[in-house]
Amino acid sequence: MEDKKAPQKQTKAQERDARLKAALKANMGRRKAQARARAAGSDGDSVNQDAAKDVSESVSNKKG
């Protein structure tokens, strides 16, 4: 019979490091995607500005 090694349990510090590493990787992916979108052109910026303007107008209409 073969001896199979039991998977080693991670300590709390190792689990935290793994969690932080995954979060950092996801954050960097979002930042790179955002930078690529900004470099692609100003089309996205104008859409975002229009959306922000629409939201601010609807908020001001509700107040007044």
Image (spheres, grey):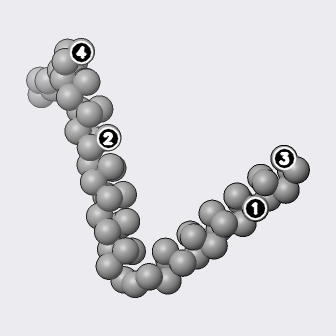
Q: Which of pointers 2 and 3 indicates the residue nearer the eye?
A: 3
The 10 Å Cα crowd at callout 2, few under 14, some 14 to 19, many 20 or more, is few
Q: Earlier in the sequence, mark 2 or mark 1?
A: 2
Q: Nearer the viewer, residue 63 or 25?
A: 63
Location of residue 36 by image quarter = bottom left
Q: Position of residue 20 (x, y in %)?
A: 26, 33
Mark sitting on residue 12: 4
- Three-letter amino acid code at the position of disc 2: Ala
Residue 23 shows in this picture: yes
Q: CA distance from mark 1 to mark 3?
A: 10 Å
Instruction: Give the answer, above or below, for where 4 lies relative to 31.
Output: above
Outermost residue on the front side: it is 64
Disc on the earlier residue, 1 or 4: 4
Left-right relation of 13 to 54: left
Query: What residue is pinned by disc 1?
Result: 57
**Distance CA(mark 3)–CA(mark 4):** 50 Å
| 53 or 4: nearer the viewer | 53
- Relative to 46, 41 lies left or right: left
